[in-house]
Image (cartoon, helix red, strand yellow):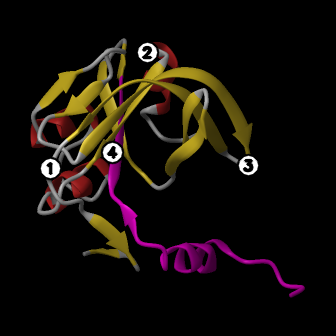
Amino acid sequence: MDSEIDAKTFWKAIGCRAIGVAVVTAQGTDGPAGFLALSATHLTASPPLMMVSIGLTTSALGAVKQGNHFAINYVPKGRDDLAAEFGGRGTLKGADRFKAGDWATLKTGAPTLVNSVGVIDCQLEEMIERHGTVIALGRIMAYTAGTKDPLISFRGGYL
Protein backbone atom coordinates (compact mmCIF):
# COMPACT_ATOMS: atom_id res chain seq x y z
CA MET A 1 0.00 0.00 0.00
CA ASP A 2 1.61 3.24 -1.17
CA SER A 3 -0.78 5.82 0.31
CA GLU A 4 -0.41 7.05 3.86
CA ILE A 5 -3.10 6.52 6.47
CA ASP A 6 -4.64 9.84 7.52
CA ALA A 7 -5.74 10.60 11.10
CA LYS A 8 -9.42 9.83 10.46
CA THR A 9 -8.56 6.44 8.98
CA PHE A 10 -6.12 5.75 11.82
CA TRP A 11 -8.83 6.27 14.48
CA LYS A 12 -11.23 4.08 12.51
CA ALA A 13 -8.60 1.34 12.25
CA ILE A 14 -7.76 1.26 15.96
CA GLY A 15 -11.43 1.56 16.87
CA CYS A 16 -11.83 -2.13 16.07
CA ARG A 17 -9.96 -3.08 19.24
CA ALA A 18 -12.08 -3.36 22.37
CA ILE A 19 -10.23 -1.78 25.29
CA GLY A 20 -10.97 -0.94 28.90
CA VAL A 21 -11.59 2.78 29.35
CA ALA A 22 -8.89 4.39 31.47
CA VAL A 23 -8.37 7.83 32.97
CA VAL A 24 -4.76 8.82 33.62
CA THR A 25 -4.28 11.16 36.57
CA ALA A 26 -1.45 13.08 38.25
CA GLN A 27 -1.06 15.62 41.05
CA GLY A 28 0.71 18.77 39.89
CA THR A 29 1.58 22.02 41.63
CA ASP A 30 -1.75 23.50 40.49
CA GLY A 31 -3.78 20.53 41.72
CA PRO A 32 -5.01 17.29 40.20
CA ALA A 33 -5.12 16.79 36.44
CA GLY A 34 -6.23 13.95 34.22
CA PHE A 35 -7.24 12.83 30.76
CA LEU A 36 -8.96 9.96 29.01
CA ALA A 37 -6.21 7.57 27.97
CA LEU A 38 -6.25 6.59 24.33
CA SER A 39 -3.18 4.42 24.82
CA ALA A 40 -2.15 2.88 28.15
CA THR A 41 -0.53 -0.54 28.26
CA HIS A 42 2.18 -2.64 29.87
CA LEU A 43 5.76 -2.57 28.65
CA THR A 44 7.61 -5.13 30.76
CA ALA A 45 6.97 -7.35 33.77
CA SER A 46 10.52 -7.13 35.08
CA PRO A 47 10.85 -4.34 35.92
CA PRO A 48 7.08 -3.74 36.11
CA LEU A 49 6.59 -0.88 33.63
CA MET A 50 3.55 0.75 32.06
CA MET A 51 3.46 3.21 29.21
CA VAL A 52 0.99 5.96 28.48
CA SER A 53 0.80 8.16 25.38
CA ILE A 54 0.18 11.85 26.14
CA GLY A 55 -0.32 14.50 23.47
CA LEU A 56 2.00 17.49 23.84
CA THR A 57 -1.06 19.77 24.00
CA THR A 58 -2.75 17.75 26.77
CA SER A 59 -3.07 20.04 29.79
CA ALA A 60 -2.37 17.17 32.24
CA LEU A 61 1.12 16.62 30.82
CA GLY A 62 2.49 19.33 33.12
CA ALA A 63 1.09 17.58 36.21
CA VAL A 64 2.68 14.27 35.14
CA LYS A 65 6.04 16.02 34.82
CA GLN A 66 5.67 18.00 38.08
CA GLY A 67 4.40 15.07 40.15
CA ASN A 68 6.84 12.64 38.55
CA HIS A 69 4.03 10.09 38.58
CA PHE A 70 0.77 8.97 36.99
CA ALA A 71 -2.06 6.60 37.85
CA ILE A 72 -4.03 4.59 35.31
CA ASN A 73 -7.60 4.33 36.58
CA TYR A 74 -9.82 1.76 34.85
CA VAL A 75 -13.37 3.09 34.64
CA PRO A 76 -16.27 0.82 35.65
CA LYS A 77 -19.29 0.08 33.49
CA GLY A 78 -21.99 2.71 33.94
CA ARG A 79 -19.54 5.59 34.41
CA ASP A 80 -19.75 6.95 30.87
CA ASP A 81 -20.17 10.37 32.54
CA LEU A 82 -16.70 10.16 34.07
CA ALA A 83 -15.18 9.12 30.75
CA ALA A 84 -16.97 12.04 29.06
CA GLU A 85 -15.62 14.56 31.57
CA PHE A 86 -12.01 13.40 31.27
CA GLY A 87 -12.38 13.01 27.52
CA GLY A 88 -13.33 16.69 27.17
CA ARG A 89 -16.96 16.01 26.19
CA GLY A 90 -18.45 17.02 29.54
CA THR A 91 -19.14 20.36 31.15
CA LEU A 92 -16.29 20.31 33.68
CA LYS A 93 -12.76 21.52 32.94
CA GLY A 94 -9.36 21.12 34.62
CA ALA A 95 -9.37 20.06 38.28
CA ASP A 96 -13.18 20.39 38.38
CA ARG A 97 -13.35 17.10 36.45
CA PHE A 98 -12.49 15.34 39.70
CA LYS A 99 -15.92 16.30 41.07
CA ALA A 100 -17.28 13.49 38.88
CA GLY A 101 -15.80 10.78 41.13
CA ASP A 102 -14.46 9.87 44.56
CA TRP A 103 -10.66 10.03 44.72
CA ALA A 104 -7.90 8.82 47.02
CA THR A 105 -4.16 8.14 46.59
CA LEU A 106 -1.93 5.10 46.76
CA LYS A 107 1.87 5.29 46.97
CA THR A 108 2.93 8.03 44.52
CA GLY A 109 0.36 10.67 45.42
CA ALA A 110 -1.40 10.56 42.04
CA PRO A 111 -5.21 10.70 42.36
CA THR A 112 -6.79 7.25 42.22
CA LEU A 113 -10.44 6.51 41.48
CA VAL A 114 -12.32 4.90 44.36
CA ASN A 115 -14.72 2.15 43.20
CA SER A 116 -12.79 1.61 39.97
CA VAL A 117 -12.19 -1.64 38.14
CA GLY A 118 -8.57 -1.21 39.18
CA VAL A 119 -5.77 1.33 39.44
CA ILE A 120 -2.11 1.08 38.51
CA ASP A 121 -0.03 3.69 40.34
CA CYS A 122 3.27 4.53 38.62
CA GLN A 123 6.43 6.51 39.35
CA LEU A 124 7.57 8.27 36.17
CA GLU A 125 10.84 6.83 34.86
CA GLU A 126 11.24 8.31 31.39
CA MET A 127 9.52 10.43 28.78
CA ILE A 128 10.13 9.95 25.07
CA GLU A 129 8.83 12.54 22.61
CA ARG A 130 7.77 11.50 19.12
CA HIS A 131 5.50 13.18 16.54
CA GLY A 132 3.66 15.50 18.95
CA THR A 133 3.23 12.81 21.59
CA VAL A 134 5.06 11.92 24.79
CA ILE A 135 5.40 8.26 25.71
CA ALA A 136 5.55 8.24 29.51
CA LEU A 137 7.13 5.15 31.05
CA GLY A 138 6.27 4.47 34.66
CA ARG A 139 7.31 1.84 37.18
CA ILE A 140 4.36 0.26 38.98
CA MET A 141 4.58 1.17 42.66
CA ALA A 142 1.13 0.04 43.81
CA TYR A 143 -2.17 -1.17 42.44
CA THR A 144 -5.74 -1.97 43.42
CA ALA A 145 -8.05 -4.51 41.83
CA GLY A 146 -11.81 -4.17 42.30
CA THR A 147 -14.68 -6.45 41.40
CA LYS A 148 -16.58 -4.11 39.05
CA ASP A 149 -17.06 -4.80 35.35
CA PRO A 150 -15.12 -2.48 33.01
CA LEU A 151 -16.44 0.19 30.69
CA ILE A 152 -15.29 -0.95 27.25
CA SER A 153 -14.49 1.36 24.33
CA PHE A 154 -15.29 -0.12 20.91
CA ARG A 155 -15.84 1.50 17.50
CA GLY A 156 -16.23 4.99 18.93
CA GLY A 157 -18.73 4.06 21.63
CA TYR A 158 -19.00 2.18 24.90
CA LEU A 159 -20.13 -1.39 25.50
Going from the N terminus, do you reach mark 2 or mark 4 first? 4
Dots 3, 2 in contact, CB < 8 A: no
Residue type beneath disc 1: Thr
- Which quadrant holds the C terminus? bottom left
3 or 2: tag closer to the N-terminus: 2
Q: Report the Cα–Cα distance between label 3 and label 4.
A: 22 Å
**Residue plotted at (32% across, 22% down):** 110
Magenta highlight on residue 9? yes
Q: Nearer the viewer, mark 3 or mark 4?
A: 4
Q: CA distance from mark 1 to mark 2?
A: 29 Å
Position of the N terminus, as image quadrant, is: bottom right
Residue that badge 1 annotates? 147
In the drawing, what numbered circle is on residue 23?
A: 4
Q: Amino acid at mark 4?
A: Val
Which of 32/136 is in front? 136
**Label 2: which residue?**
67
Q: Is residue 158 magenta?
A: no
Marks 4/1: CA–CA distance: 18 Å
Circle 2 sits in a helix, a strand or a loop, which is it? helix
Label 3 to label 2, Cα distance in Å? 24 Å
Q: Answer with the quarter of the image where residue 32 lies.
A: top left
> Residue at (14%, 49%) from the top-left corner?
147
